[in-house]
Amino acid sequence: MIENVRNNSPAEDAGLQSNDEIVSLAEKKSDEDSWRKTLARFKPGDSVPVTVKRDRRTIKTNLVLGQPERFDYKIEETTGCDAEQKALRAAWLSGK
Amino acid sequence: LDHGISRGRLSTRGLWVAEGFTNYYGHLMLRRAGLWDDQKFLEREAQTIKRIESAPGSRLMSAEESSLSAPFIDGRTRAVDQPAEHVDQLLPKGELIGMVMDLLVRGRTKGKASLDDVMRDMYEEFYLKSPNSSYYLRGRGYQTEDLERIVSRRSGFDFSDFFKRHVRDVELLPYDEAFGYVGLRLVKTQSKEPFDAGLGINFEDRGNR
């Protein structure tokens, strides 16, 4: 089931709504595993046929995948980190 | 506090402090107690940064506005899409504001003060030294402006601009300055997910419907 649809997203453009039940993706029955595997075959700009159930209606639409917007974050030590910075960090993390 | 909010009776702009700082100190205390090492703590905070910075709602609703929305969301009888997305960020957003504020105080004072000192000051002023707000509750509680005043006083730096931009508005937190004081930096990389569909799916709910 679709839990949320972001504003101005490919899903919204395709007319998908919260609580729609996904029936198929790219003409294949869709569960969690197959959803990811199927989508992984496509790239941004590709149009993927999606079928959902909304109430008692079956709705067919196309999801045009957008450019990825998600990022991973990592906090790491800077090169050339000096003793004063290290001391401040130690005080922060130890509380002493 | 939690029970009052759940019943929709309380409305405060400062919930991001109460809930978010609790999140921040919860993680920091695990590190300080030796249950987490530095790496684990920093990974956990990086996850929180990802959660906030990847969520479109974090640029639509400020920490104060999320606080005011909380009673309506907590008291809902069914899922609400966008507002729930906003208020679900209340805790992690408050956590990040707390962490960044802590590092700014430590850095700008060269380690002479910290958020720990600010919390002690608030405990003293609003709990120990304040008259009872009712016959059974000691102290008077606090407003966001009280925190702003005390963090400015304790650090010797005016934090009004920080509150204006990052608490009452939705500007990106100054991660570079904050982490820079302790020799760290935030690295942002493209996620492995190669596309954006713009929807969230719950596959587990299918059997229940």
Image: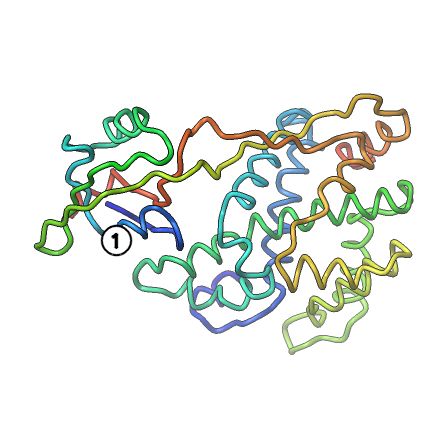
Q: Is residue B160 above or below residue B134?
A: above
Name the element at disc 1.
loop
Q: Is residue B74 above or below residue B134?
A: above
Q: Position of residue B159 (x, y in %)?
A: 80, 59
| Left or right: where B13 falls relative to A35 | right
Q: Position of residue B48 (x, y in %)?
A: 57, 40
Q: Is residue B94 above or below residue B201?
A: below
**Circle 1: residue type:** Gly
Q: In front here: B1 or A70? A: A70
Q: Position of residue B46 (x, y in %)?
A: 60, 34
Q: Is residue A66 above or below residue B150?
A: above
| Left or right: where B111 falls relative to B125 | right
Going by the picture, which residue comes out furthest to the top?
A79
Q: Residue at x 49, y 47 (%)?
A: B55
Which residue is denoted by mark 1 in the rendering?
A15
Q: Residue at x 71, y 42 (%)?
A: B175
- Please state, as top left, top right, bottom left or bottom right, where the N terminus of chain A lies in the image: top left
| Left or right: where B7 falls relative to B132 | left
Q: Residue at x 65, y 64 (%)?
A: B168
Which quadrant holds residue A17? Answer: bottom left
Label 1 resides on the chain identified as A
Q: In front here: A63 or A55? A: A63
- Please state, as top left, top right, bottom left or bottom right, where the C terminus of chain A lies in the image: top right
Going by the picture, which residue comes out furthest to the front?
A45
Which quadrant holds residue B178? Answer: top right
Going by the picture, which residue comes out furthest to the left?
A56
Q: Residue at x 62, y 26 (%)?
A: B40
